[in-house]
Image (spheres, grey):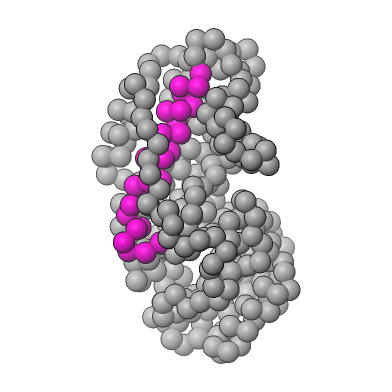
């Protein structure tokens, strides 16, 4: 029994490198693309300015400390006569948060985030369901742990969601052990899916339109189930290591620079499979063998999770 790889519904939509540097996506929302493109950050980090009719504004995921990026953000704030009220983070990863303290100091505003691990600026903890209001525009937080434990998505009044690294504009998100947790990640995908976003503004890559948003969420869930089943199938009754499993699953299809990420994401699947009783440790924490029920039961379990209301 095996399942096949699902098809990515976004193939060919927006070629990499073709995103505009600055674009107004809807009333009260501007996206500024940071110049930090890489295999991990795709086109670069998406920084968003969310603002109300009265000019009050929040900067979401300020991105890397880069003077050209700072210049573009300042130009938008100035030309639109915005009054920054805070810096909001979807999660603590450096490609999103590096310049948070810079803007916090420059504008004398707090940092709003799902975890406050790095004091040094005034900070406000954001929890599931919290709303950040500006006149006519609003960010409603949804705690979506998985990519990181502190990850937040934000729903706008337009019912489009800012998704950070929970859902990306291209490719799939890395859920890397140990901060990444696959069990939580799957639940958070179901949480976002059940909130019914009309479209998504990701932390990297182009926006996901009303035509594709539902299909992309479906693809993300199917892709993750496919990867989990691959990880289970890469192990047998004979003990093997996580690195062996990575080679079985990915073969030569990944660039050597991304092997590390593939290993950490495989490790996250292993942790979930151990937790659910499908794998057990064999001797040390790098080797595992199959335990208990097989793939069919796992797939049945995952499908049942999906049918349960979140
Ligand atoms: Zn990122």
The magenta-colored residue range is: 208-235
Using residue 157 as the reference point, say whether residue 100 is left or right of it: right
Q: Nearer the viewer, residue 277 or 71?
A: 71
Using residue 295 as the reference point, say whether residue 271 is left or right of it: right
Q: Is residue 23 visible?
A: yes
Magenta span contains residue 185: no
Picture mark count: 0
Residue occupying the point 54% across, 42% down: 175
Relative height, residue 175 to residue 170 (above, below): above
Q: Is residue 59 visible?
A: no
Residue 184, quarter of picture: top left
Quadrant (top left/top right/bottom left/bottom right) for the C terminus? top left
Residue 197, percent across and down?
34, 60
Residue occupying the point 42% across, 53% down: 11
Q: Main secondary structure of the magenta part?
A: helix
Magenta span contains residue 230: yes
Relative height, residue 238 to residue 258 (above, below): above
Q: Nearer the viewer, residue 251 or 234?
A: 251
Using residue 294 as the reference point, say whether residue 242 is left or right of it: right
Relative height, residue 209 to residue 149 (above, below): below
Q: Nearer the viewer, residue 120 or 230?
A: 230
Quadrant (top left/top right/bottom left/bottom right) for the N terminus? top left
Residue occupying the point 31% across, 61% down: 211
Residue 15, percent across and down?
50, 61
Residue occupying the point 38% across, 18% down: 294
Residue 172, percent across and down?
49, 47
Relative height, residue 179 to residue 37 (above, below): above
Residue 26, percent across and down?
41, 77
Residue 198, quarter of picture: bottom left
């Amino acid at each position: 029994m095996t399942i096949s790889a699902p098809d990515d519904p976004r193939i060919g939509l927006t070629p990499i490198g073709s995103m505009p540097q600055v674009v107004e996506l809807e009333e009260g929302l501007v996206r500024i693309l940071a110049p930090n493109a890489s295999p991990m950050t795709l086109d670069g980090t998406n920084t968003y300015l969310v603002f109300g009719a009265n000019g009050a504004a929040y900067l979401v995921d300020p991105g890397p400390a880069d003077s050209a990026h700072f210049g573009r953000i300042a130009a938008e704030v100035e030309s639109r006569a915005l009054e920054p009220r805070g810096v909001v983070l979807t999660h603590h990863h450096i490609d999103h948060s590096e310049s948070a303290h810079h803007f916090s100091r420059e504008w004398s505003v707090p940092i709003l985030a799902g975890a406050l691990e790095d004091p040094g600026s005034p900070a406000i903890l954001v929890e599931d369901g919290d709303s950040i209001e500006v006149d006519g525009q609003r960010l409603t937080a949804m705690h979506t742990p998985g990519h990181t434990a502190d990850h937040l998505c934000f729903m706008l009044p337009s019912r489009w969601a800012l998704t950070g690294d929970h859902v990306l504009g291209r490719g799939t998100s890395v859920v890397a052990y140990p901060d990444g947790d696959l069990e939580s990640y799957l639940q958070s995908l179901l949480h976002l899916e059940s909130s019914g976003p009309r479209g998504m503004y990701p932390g990297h890559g182009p926006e996901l339109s009303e035509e594709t948003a539902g299909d992309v969420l479906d693809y993300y869930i199917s892709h993750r189930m496919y990867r989990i089943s691959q990880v289970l199938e890469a192990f047998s009754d004979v003990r093997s290591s996580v690195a062996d499993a990575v080679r079985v699953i990915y073969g030569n299809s990944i660039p050597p620079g991304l092997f590390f990420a593939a290993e950490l994401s495989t490790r996250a699947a292993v942790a979930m499979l151990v937790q659910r009783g499908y794998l057990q440790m064999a001797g040390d924490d790098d080797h595992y063998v199959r335990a208990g029920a097989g793939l069919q039961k796992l797939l049945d379990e995952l499908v049942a999770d999906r049918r349960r209301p979140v």
